[in-house]
Image (spheres, helix red, strand yellow):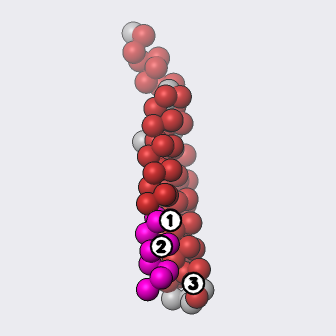
Amino acid sequence: MEENKTLTKHSPGYGIYILVWLALVTLTALTAAVAGISFGKFSIVVALIIAMVKSYLVLSEFMHLKFEMKAFRVFVVVAILFFLLLIVLLFQNYSYY
């Protein structure tokens, strides 16, 4: 009986899922539209920013990260920071060619 209370506590409802899905579809269309526009050196940065927003929506809503313990969130933040460090180092090396 106690388990059912914790499961219903983490269920935000279908309305939130539909709104997040619509946001993801819109951001995907925006990604496709931005691909046709030339931003010069910032084209990749704009695409990565849109991808980060989409990743945040998936992580927080569909993977229920906002309901997890603080320690788990720290692990995810460390993984994201490590990924960002790798991206920065990759583009640092890429900019010399």
Q: Report which residue position mark 1 lands on.
A: 88
Mark sitting earlier along the chain (2/3):
3
Mark 2–mark 3 CB contact (< 8 Å): no
Residue 18 visible (yes or no): no
- C-alpha gap between disc 1 and disc 3: 14 Å
Q: Nearer the viewer, residue 95 or 76?
A: 95
Quarter of the rendering occupied by the N terminus: top left
Please state the extent of the stretch shown in magenta in the rendering.
Answer: 87-97
Q: Residue at x 49, y 28 (%)?
A: 71
- Which type of secondary structure does the marked residue at label 1 adopt? helix
Residue at disc 3, secondary structure: helix
Pointer 1 with pointer 2, Cβ within 8 A: yes
- The label on residue 91 is 2
Determine the residue positioned at 43% across, 24% down: 7
Count of number-bearing discs? 3
Position of 31 relative to 7 (above/below): below
- Quarter of the image with the C terminus is bottom left
Depth-wise, is mark 2 or mark 3 nearer the camera?
2
Q: Out of 57 and 85, give the one closest to the viewer.
A: 85
Query: How many neighbours does mark 2 have within 10 angstroms: few (below 14), some (14-19), or many (20 or more)?
Result: few
Report x, y in % for residue 22.
52, 60
Disc 1/disc 2 C-alpha distance (Å): 5 Å
Residue at (46% x, 20% y) in the render:
6
